[in-house]
Image (cartoon, helix red, strand yellow):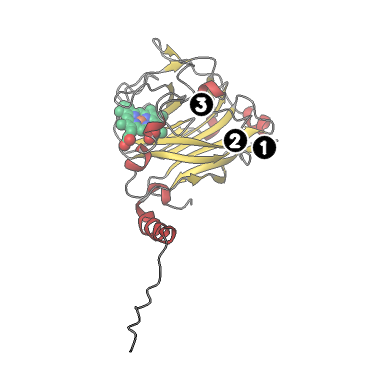
Amino acid sequence: MAQISKPVRPHRSATTSTIILLTLLSPCMAQTKTTSPFTDQATGIQFQRFFGARTNFGFGIALPQTPNTSFIGQLTFPLVNRAGWGGFSLTGDMEGPLLMAAWADGAGGVVSSFRQAFDEDNDPPEVTGAFSVRPIAEATSANGSFLTYTFLCEGCLGAALGLDAAAATTAEMGWALGSRAVRNPGSSAGALAFHDTGFGDFEADLAAARSAQFDTWAALAGAPLQPAAGARAFDLAAGDGEGDSGDEGGADEGDRDGEESDDDD
Ligand code: HEM
């Protein structure tokens, strides 16, 4: 009697199916980007920089050879008819850690402001604490369409602020870019609107951000900026970002067009 042989079907394991599914989904899933080397032309400062090719938002970080509580940062981003703001978070979250936002003051200068968010519904208030920012004028400018802000941030790193660079070789950090005008832009307490252009997180290669030239670069920094009257004390208890990991997914949500999967320039 002739046997009816069963057609041989390639067996697809659950793992294979998962891989196929992830491959299909990957173009629309945000991928965490890592910083890469970038040298500022005006000062020669060597940063590890996150750069979003869709938005042209950049954030660079440079650290001393033996990391302490200071870093040199550089924010670069387009403005829309002089309007808009850009910023970073010391963690991948908005709520809790030390944030900094910068914008054009409308008179050729750059205003920066330390912020701390306690929710994602309101403009985060300006905060003050044992940290300060000292602009590096040679590499700070704003015109109608682009802003560059280079600064020494002293006392800005530590576990309670969100990032302990002495204890980490990589760290997740966050970025945000808004196109709408800051209300009362001449003040560091100016009111920010939602980061409608983009936001998300990235991985900062802190080991590669270290440089023996840090002190030479830091010597370029000017006087510390003072916060506006009414800035509140940074809440150290909220600053480590603990307990708000639930909003991780927000980065993907806000970046549906694949910003984070773009290549670095
Ligand atoms: C009016 C001001 C602001 C509003 C209304 C706002 C609102 C929000 C909202 C609703 C989300 C979550 C979006 C989602 O899950 O789809 C978010 C995420 C985020 N925001 Fe803001 N934000 C403001 C200012 C800022 C500032 C000043 C910074 C940094 C300087 C910042 C950094 C971030 C980051 C890094 C994320 C991603 C964090 C995560 O998903 O956990 N935001 N923001």
| CB of mark 3 near ligand 1 (< 8 Å) | no
Q: What quarter of the picture does the N terminus occupy? A: bottom left
Q: CA distance from mark 3 to mark 1?
A: 22 Å
Q: Is residue 241 above or below residue 21?
A: above
Q: Mark 3 falls on what kind of element?
A: loop
Q: Are marks 2 and 1 in contact (CB under 8 Å)?
A: yes
Q: Position of residue 182 (x, y in %)?
A: 32, 27
Would you say the residues marked 3 and 1 are in contact, meaning their CB atoms lie under 8 Å apart?
no
Q: Quadrant of residue 254?
A: top left
Foreground pick, 167 / 101: 167
User: Residue type at mark 1?
Assistant: Ser
Residue 18 relative to residue 183: left or right: right
Question: Which is more foreground, mark 3 or mark 2?
Answer: 3
- Residue 56 tag number: none
Residue topped by disc 3: 162
Instruction: Please name the residue that numbered disc 1 is placed on.
Output: 211
- Residue 234 placement, left or right of 4: right
Mark nearer the N terminus (2 vs 1): 2
In the image, residue 91 lies at what x, y percent? 48, 31
Name the spot of residue 160 as percent of width and height, x first.
53, 21
Mark 2 C-beta to ligand 1 under 8 Å = no
Can residue 81 be seen? no
Q: Amino acid at mark 2?
A: Ala
Residue 165's x, y, as percent? 60, 30
Q: Residue furthest bottom?
A: 1
Write down the residue under mark 2: 62
Determine whether, in the image, residue 169 is placed left or right of residue 120: right
- Circle 2 residues within 10 Å: few <14, some 14–19, many ≥20: many
Amino acid type assigned to the residue bearing label 3 in the image: Gly
Report the mark closest to the observer, 3 or 1: 3
Q: Earlier in the sequence, mark 3 or mark 2?
A: 2
How busy is the neighbourhood of tag 1: few (under 14 within 10 Å), some, or many (20 plus)?
some
